[in-house]
Image (cartoon, grey):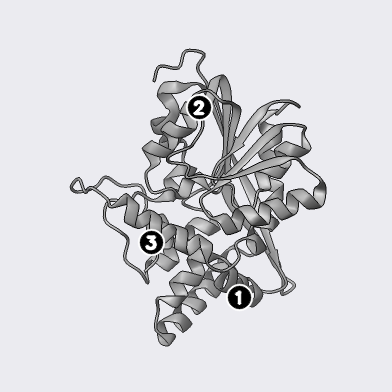
Amino acid sequence: MNALSDTISRQAQPQAAAVEPDFAAVKTRQRAAWSSGDYAVVGTTLQIVGETLCEALDLRAGANVLDVAAGNGNASLAAARRGCNVVSTDYVPALLTRGRERAAAERLDIEFREADVEALPFDDDAFDAVLSTFGAMFAPNPRRTAAEMLRVCAPGGRIGMANWTPESFVGQLFKTIGRHVRPPAGIESPALWGTRKRIEELFGTRAAAIRCESRRFNFRYRSPQEMVDVFRNYYGPVLKAFGALEPAAQATLSEELLALIGRFNRAEDGTVVLPSEYLEIVITTTQNTPR
């Protein structure tokens, strides 16, 4: 059973009764999922999203920037390329190692620190900008996550995020996986982070402005089967989902993923060019920041 694949499959709907989630247990499972496989194989293909987000924030040289749940460092690298002072954080050491390797190859000066987005080890108002590309949305406690991002962002600073939407290929990928595993009680769908409504709920009281734009990232692979194989072998949540199933159920899930890819794929030459919608978010914090 996989917390990440389970939880993102939930759609926005009111809970019948209040359930106190076991956030620590969910986080332990999430860390194990992201530590499995090699997310960088998929993550590096998403580099353009980090570049686009940094442009949306209009980052200036010399700005102090924090990348949370940074994975293998797409947004971190993009900010460093723009002359920013960057701290890249994640709670999976293996992902930070991948980020360090990439920064070293480009001779970029980035500080890498192991840190949980729900408990950031930084002072209040420490950063001019806080970034997250497809990372913070997976933390199990959304309100705590948003509060921490706001806490470390300076008054009048900016928070930039790229979050998969519920209707996107990735949102539907996890929904498909969710039909094979059981969601943990009380954990909201990470896909809600890809809706303006949820962003306003989490950040609205501390935001001077919120800008949300729908964008699309194109996954590109040699074939649908290659795409399934890459996600199955390297993308931790999918790898863990397959590992939790018996062989017959694995075959069924593989067939469903191929069908899903076929539904989104716009290529007609046997390759994959697959648009997946995400919400690009730029939040400007208020000058007055009550704690």
Structural distance between the alpha carbons of marks 1 and 2: 42 Å
Horizontal side of 182 relative to 72 (left or right) equals: left
Element class at badge 1? helix
Residue 233 x/y as whole percent: 58, 73
Quadrant where the C terminus sits is: top left
How would you rate the neighbour count of disc 2 (Cα within 10 Å): few for under 14, some for 14-19, many for 20 or more? Answer: few
**Outermost residue toward the bottom in this view:** 248
Residue type, mark 1 in image:
Asp
Residue 250 is drawn in which quadrant? bottom left
Which sits earlier in the primary sequence, circle 1 or circle 3? 3
List x then y, in percent, for residue 222.
72, 72
Q: Is residue 173 visible?
A: no
Disc 2 versus disc 3: distance between alpha carbons?
Answer: 34 Å
Q: Is residue 244 left or right of residue 21?
A: right
- Return the residue nearer the eye: 174 or 69: 69
Disc on res. 229:
1
Q: Mark 2 vs mark 3: which is more N-terminal? A: 3
Q: How far apart, in angstroms, are the residues tagged by discs 1 and 3?
A: 20 Å
User: In terms of secondary structure, where does tag 2 sit?
Assistant: loop
Left or right, residue 63 beside residue 263: right
Tell me residue 202's x, y (percent): 40, 33
Residue 200 against residue 286 in the figure, above or below: below
Q: Looking at the image, is mark 1 or mark 2 nearer the viewer?
A: 2
- Three-letter amino acid code at disc 2? Asp
Q: Which mark is residue 123?
A: 2
For the point 39% across and 58% down, which residue is it?
A: 28
| Dot 3 amino acid type | Asp
Residue that carries the numbered disc 3 in the rendered image: 6
